[in-house]
Every structure is written in C-alpha cells, then in structure tokens.
Image (cartoon, rainbow, N blue to C red):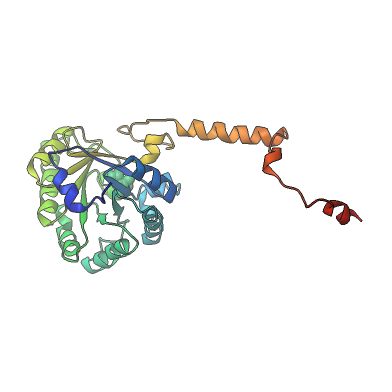
C-alpha cells in the first residue's frame, strides 16, 4: 500500500467513502494500518479512553505528542492526523503554528482543530506554514461547557445555518477535510454538498464523504460510549476471560508449564548445595 497523503484524501471525495478511526498507541496503530484504513486519528478522546479523564479538557501538548509519536513509530501508510488539544491553538495564531509544527516533527501528517469561522485565521496560518489542517464542526467537545453539554447540534434552521457557514469558512480558509460531529444528518448532507473538501462524520448520518469512530467504542472498551457509536466486538469480555484463565492457572499451579522454565547445568545444583 502506498502512503496516503492529504492530496489523496481530498481526491477521494465522491469516489470512495473515507474510513477514519482513532488509535493512541504503537500496537493498535499497527493493526489499524495493516487493515488499511484511510486515516488514523490520534484524537484527544485519548483523555477519556486511555487516560481516564472526565473530558478532553485535561490532555495537553505533552500527552498528545507522546501518543502521536507512539502511533508514528508504527510507520502507518494511513494518513496520520493528530488532534490539537484544548488551549494549544486558541490563544493566538503564533502559538497555534508552533504547537501544530511539533506534531509534524513527531510524525503526524496533519492536525485537527475544533471550531468554525472564528478559527479561519488559525487554519490560514497553519496552511501557510505547510501544516495541513482538518476542521471539526458541529459538536466540538472541547467547548462542551459553552455548548451546554454533549448535545445533538443543528436541530433548528438557525443553528444549522451557523454550522454550515462554519464548515464553509474553514474549507475556504484551507482545511483539507472537515469532521462533522453529532449534527442532524440534513446539516452534514448540506455541508457535504457545499464544500469541495471531504466531510468525515461521526453521529451525523450517512450523507458524508466518510465516517470516523473512536476505537475503544468499536472494540467495546468504553465505559460510556456515545449513542452514535457502534460496538463491533466485546473486547472487554474477551480480555477479562483471558486474564481469568491466567489467574486460574497461577492459583491452581498450572502456570508456568515445563517448557516455560529452565534448569542449571548438570551437576551445578549439587555443587550449589555443597
Ligand atoms: O478525539 C476524537 O476521537 C475525535 C473524533 C471523535 C473525531 O475528535
Ligand atoms: Na477530538
């Protein structure tokens, strides 16, 4: 498989549904890349899925860079996108460029930022610096306190119009694709029709250029998966059963077995005792 580039992702619009999934570590990234998804996202959902925090607000640049570097060591052919964490791009454009650049230095191919028309200056500055930007509109979890929780967005024409304008603004500013999270499906469909770059949806219906899911939701490892997630396997039960077998083996003297331990040279044990 050839390396997936930002240009290839843009060219997929209208040709093939784009597949994106999160990964946060080396072994998972290897599995996901071998399957051959289009895009791997080191999401700031890391905060909850891996680090056990209550929201995405708790992760910082160090957390995101460490996990992006780990995923990058899997040398994925998939496009590697990293989420810019809360407070790494909002304060000013200079900070945004410097922080985004750090992600490319550890192996990311692009970064993702949450926000619409109020962030076109950041999208432009990153693009100017050669850092491809993925946008993220609709439900933007870093702003859940302002938005009034994790709610379905764009149910009214007024809110729908805002989201559509946000998407158009960041596409115009240079974003190479846009995540649309938890909006009414009509809103995602309308954005998909209007913007030239691919839309990648989560909880926003099928009328998009691609879909994204959080891998812990897919694998059945999440405590509180969102209503739009699909669980493809109950890995929690599979892991628990393997650990239970190990526990039973140790407690019943079945592990380790003969082929899993080793002996001193002939005669050396007798010499040790004398
Ligand atoms: O952090 C994340 O996992 C995301 C996806 C849900 C798009 O931003
Ligand atoms: Na995110």
- Placement of the C terminus among the 4 image quadrants: bottom right
Left or right of 111, for residue 157: left
Q: Percent from the top left, x then y, of residue 36?
A: 31, 42
Direction left: furthest residue: 194
> Is residue 193 placed above or below 8 in the rendered structure?
above
Residue ID at (61%, 32%):
245
Q: Position of residue 191 (x, y in %)?
A: 12, 41
Give the vertical position of 210 relative to 109 (above or below): above
Between 217 and 4, the one nearer to me in the picture: 4
- Tell me the quarter of the picture where residue 152 sits: top left
Q: Residue 123's x, y, as percent?
A: 17, 59
> As rendered, which of 231 and 167 lies closer to the eye?
231
Q: How many marks?
A: 0
Q: Is residue 232 above or below residue 202?
A: above
Q: Residue at x 68, y 37 (%)?
A: 255
Up-down: is 140 above or below 110? Answer: above
Ligand 1 resides in the quarter of the picture at top left
* Horizontal side of residue 273 vs 115, given as left or right: right
247 and 165: which one is in front? 247
Q: Quadrant of residue 244?
A: top right
Identity of the residue furthest to the front in this view: 266
- Residue 61, x across and y down, in percent: 36, 61
265 relative to 58 in the view: left or right? right
Please report the residue visible at 37 percent of the width from the left and 40 percent of the height from the top.
215
Along the line of sight, the residue nearer the viewer: 26 or 225: 26
Residue 20 visible here? yes
Q: Is residue 145 visible?
A: no
């Amino acid at each position: 498989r050839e390396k997936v580039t930002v240009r290839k992702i843009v060219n997929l619009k209208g040709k093939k549904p784009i597949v994106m999934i999160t990964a946060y570590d080396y072994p998972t990234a290897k599995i996901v890349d071998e399957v051959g998804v289009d895009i791997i996202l080191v999401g700031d959902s890391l905060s909850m899925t891996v680090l056990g925090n209550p929201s995405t607000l708790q992760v910082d640049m160090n957390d995101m860079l460490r996990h992006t570097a780990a995923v990058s060591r899997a040398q994925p052919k998939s496009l590697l996108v990293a989420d810019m964490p809360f407070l790494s791009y909002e304060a000013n454009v200079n900070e945004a460029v410097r922080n985004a650049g750090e992600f490319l230095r550890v192996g990311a191919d692009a970064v993702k930022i949450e926000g619409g028309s109020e962030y076109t200056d950041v999208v432009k500055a990153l693009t100017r610096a050669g850092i491809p930007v993925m946008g993220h509109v609709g439900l933007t979890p870093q702003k859940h306190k302002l938005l009034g929780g994790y709610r379905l967005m764009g149910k009214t024409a007024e809110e729908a119009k805002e989201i559509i304008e946000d998407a158009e603004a960041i596409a115009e500013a240079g974003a190479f694709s846009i995540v649309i999270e938890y909006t009414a499906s009509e809103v995602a469909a309308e954005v998909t029709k209007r913007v030239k770059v691919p839309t990648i949806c989560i909880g926003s219906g099928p009328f998009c250029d691609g879909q994204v899911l959080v891998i812990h939701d897919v694998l059945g490892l999440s405590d509180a998966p969102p209503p739009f997630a699909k669980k493809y396997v109950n890995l929690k039960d599979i892991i628990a059963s393997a650990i239970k077998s190990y526990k039973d083996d140790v407690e019943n003297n079945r592990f380790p077995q003969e082929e899993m331990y080793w002996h001193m040279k002939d005669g050396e044990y007798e010499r040790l005792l004398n």
